[in-house]
Amino acid sequence: MKESLQIVQTGGSSITKFNSIFSHDSKYLLCPCGNLVKVFSVATGECFQRLNGHCKLVTMICHHPRVQLQILSSSLDGTVKVWDYEDGILLSTCDFNVPLLGIFAHSCYSTVAFVIQQSDDSNELYRFTLNTIPSKTSDIACSLLAKNVVKDCSKRIAFSEKFAVVSYSNRLLVFINPQHAERDEKIRHVLKDNAPAITCISCHPVEECFATGHANGEIRIWFNISDVKNVISSIQHWHSLEVLSLKFSSSGSTVLSGGHEGVLVQWLEDSKNFLPRLGSAITNVAVSKDSTLFAVSLLDNSILIITNYFTIKQTFDGFTAIGQNLPCGICYDSNTNACVTNGKPGHLLFYLPDKDIQLYNLDIVSRNFISSVDLEKPLSKTNILKVGFGGTFDGVKHMATMEFDQAKQRDEKLKFWRFSDTDQQWVLETIVKSPHDGCGITSLTFSPANNACVTTSQAGFAKIWFKHDEEGWLCEMSLSFRDLPCNDSTFSEDGSVLALAFGHTVCFCDISNNEEMQLMLSHSESIKSIFFGRQSCQHLLVAATSEELLCWNVMTKSMYWSSHIHKINFLICDIHSENMAVFTNSNKIFVFQPSDKQPHYSHNLSIDVTAACFVPSKNCDIAWQAKSELYLVSKEMSVHKFCVKSEVDDASNLSRMIIKSDQVTPMSNYLSSTQQKTAKTVNSNRLQETTVDDTLRYILDTPCHVLPSMSTLCDQFISSLLLQQPSDQSEDISKHNKNDNFEETEAKNDKKASKDEDLLEELEKRVEQVKVEDFEWIQPLCKRKLEEFSC
C-alpha cells in the first residue's frame, strides 16, 4: 500500500556557512541553518528557537533597524521575512520574486534595508523601504545601487553610520549616506595591479574608516575614504594564508581577524593578541553589542563563544559531518541511542537525529589540526573508513574503527574500543597496524553471538578477530576464495552463519566450529552488499549488484526472487524489524521485506542521499516505520525523514519552541527546588520568631554587601507585620480531615471563621498604626500579602 508521505528536514545543515549575529542583550546567538534560523542560548548552549518559514536556503540575517527584538532574514526563495525571535513569530513577509543572496540593515537607516538580488547576468545591490511591507511584488520600491556584486556578499559588503562599502577583487565602491545615495553617487577606489585580491571587509562603527582582508594575508586599514586623491591606508600582516573573516569591535578600538590557520587574532593599536589551536579554519567572526563576547565560526560547523579575555565560554556544535562524503556511512549505536558517522576530521560524530542534537565527537585518530602552507596542495588526512558496534558480552560493549590515509596510502589502523561504565566513555583496547596491508577495507562486522569481528578487503581476504582477556583482539582466521575481492560480510541474526561476498559469489561458513566455506550462490555480476533478513525473514539473504536485487533462501539453497533496479547505490537493513531499503543513483528509494518482492513503499526523492539509517522509534504513524524510522543524509549534509501529510502540516508552523526557558538545566532545576524549600523553611521560622523591630534592625544593621535581594527583604518585613494564628487553631485545622463527625466539623468551621474575622480586624488595626506613607514603595506588596492572608 502506497502512503502519501513527504520528506521533511529534521536537522543537519551548516550553522557556519553564513554570518551569525548576537542579540542586542547578548543572551542569544542567531545562526542561519538550512531553511531556518536557529536561536541559541549563550548561557546554556541549547537551541532556544527555530524560526521555520522559508522554503529554501536562508542566506543571511540582520537586526531590524528600529525594533531590537526583531530580525530580518533573506532566502533563495526570494522573500524577506521579519521575525520576533524571542517569541518565534513571523511578523511579515516581503516577496521579491528573485533569489536573494543577502540582506543588510543599520540602526542609523531606520526606514530602509538593502538586499542582494541574484540574476542570470549579475548580482545586484538594491535599497528598499521598510516602513510598510507590500503584499505584491510590483509594489516594492527598489533602488539599484551596485551591479556585479560577488556571490559571497556577506563578507564583501559592510555598512557604518555614515557610509557603506561594496568590495570587489581589486576595487572598492563607497556610498556616503547610503540611505539616500543614488547609484551614480559613489566613490571609487581602485587597487594597484599588483595588489592582492580583497577577500573580506569590515567598517568602523563610528569613524570614516574600514578594514579589508586580502588573499595574501594582509589587512589594510583605510582612512579619509571620502577623498579619492588623499585616501590613506596602512598595512598589517600576520596571516600566512588568505584572511577569511574580519570584524571591528563595537567601539572600533580593536579588529578581529581569522583564517585557515585556526588562530583568532585581535589587532590593537600597538600590539596583537592571539587565541591559537581552535581546531579548524575560522570562517566568520561576530561581535556582541558590548564587545564582551565574540562568536567564532569554524569550518567544522561549530561556533565558539569567546570572551574579551580570550577564554572559551560556550560551544555550539552543528552537524559536524559538513564537508565530507561520510566514508563510514551511518550506523546505530544502541548504547547511546544515537546515529554514528564521520564528524570532525579524525572524529566520530554521535548524533540524535530526532532531536537534532549532537552528543559529542569522539577522537579516533588523535591528531591536531594543521593548516596547509599552500591551499592548492592540501595536507593529506587520515580518515575513518569503517565503524562497527558489537553486542554486550560479559557486561562490556565493543566498537571497532578502521582508519586510513587514502591520499598517501599509509597509516592503516584497526582499533578496538570498549565502553567504560565507570568513566562513561570509550576506551581504546587494541591497535592493529596494517591489518590488510593498505589494500582497502570494504566491510567491518561484529558477530551478534560472541566477541568476534570480521574485516574484509579488496585484496580478497576476510579476517576473523576474537577477543582475549590478556592479549586483546587477535586474528585467528583468514579466509579467501579464488583470489576474488571480498566486497562485504554479514552475520545471521543468531550469529551462527557468516556470509562473505567474494566477487560475484557468496560463501558461507561457521566461525565457531572452524568449518570450511561453502559456496552458496553465484551471479554474473559482482555483488556489492549482502544482508541477512531479520526476525521472520532470518532464513533469507538479500544481495545487491549494480543493476539487480537478489534474494536467496538459505534453507533450500535456491533463489527466492530477483528484481531489476537500475544503478543501485547502496542497501541498508533494519536490525529491529524485517525492513530493508535500497537507494539508487537516480534518487529513488524502495522499502521492502525479503519475504516479499513487491516493495512496501517507493519514492522519488528530491535530495541526493549519501547515507541512511534506521533508528528505533515507537511514535511513528507510518505502518512500515512502526518499529524504526528511516533517516536520510543528503550530500549537503542535511538530515531528513518521512512524514505523513498531516504531520507535515502540523510541523509547518512558523516557529517551534524548543525549550520554555533558556536557563533550564538539571543543576538549575535542583538548585531552584532546594532554594524554594530553604526559603519556605526560613520564611516560616522568621514568621514565627521575628518581630517588626527585629526585622528592621536586621535590615539596617546588616552590611549592604551581604544583604539579600530587595524582594526577600520586603517579604520578611511584611511577614513580620502579620499576626500568627494561635497554636490551638492550627491543631484544629490539622484535625479537620480526621474528624468523622459532621456536626463537630461544622462547629469547628464556624469557630475558625469567627477567629479569622477577629484576626483580620486586629491585623487591620496593626497595619493602620504603621505610617504607610513612609513605605510607599512596598504598598503593592502589602496589598498582596493581605490578600494572601485573607484567602
Image: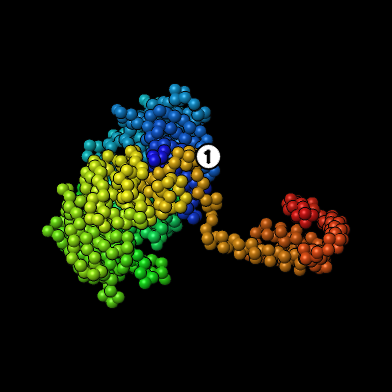
Could one spot residue 546 in this view of the protein? yes
In the foreground, 484 or 558: 558
Residue drawn where x is 32% and y is 63% of the image: 494
Is the residue 740 above or below the residue 774 in the image? Answer: below
User: Which quadrant of the figure has residue 336?
Assistant: bottom left
- Name which quarter of the figure residue 343 lies in: bottom left
Of 157 and 33, the residue lying toward us: 33
Residue shown at 36% from the left, 42% from the top: 601
Residue lying farthest to the top in this orientation: 138
Q: How is the image coloured?
A: rainbow
Q: Is residue 406 visible?
A: no
Across and down, in percent, residue 651 comes to 48, 42
Instruction: Tell me if 88 is positioned left or right of 147 in this view.
Output: right
Residue at numbered disc 1: 89
Q: Residue at x 43, y 43 (%)?
A: 643
Q: Residue 272 in the image: state x and y as whole percent.
A: 36, 54
Q: Amino acid at mark 1?
A: Ile
**As drawn, which residue projects farthest toward the left?**
482
> In the rendered view of the protein, which quadrant contains the C terminus?
bottom right
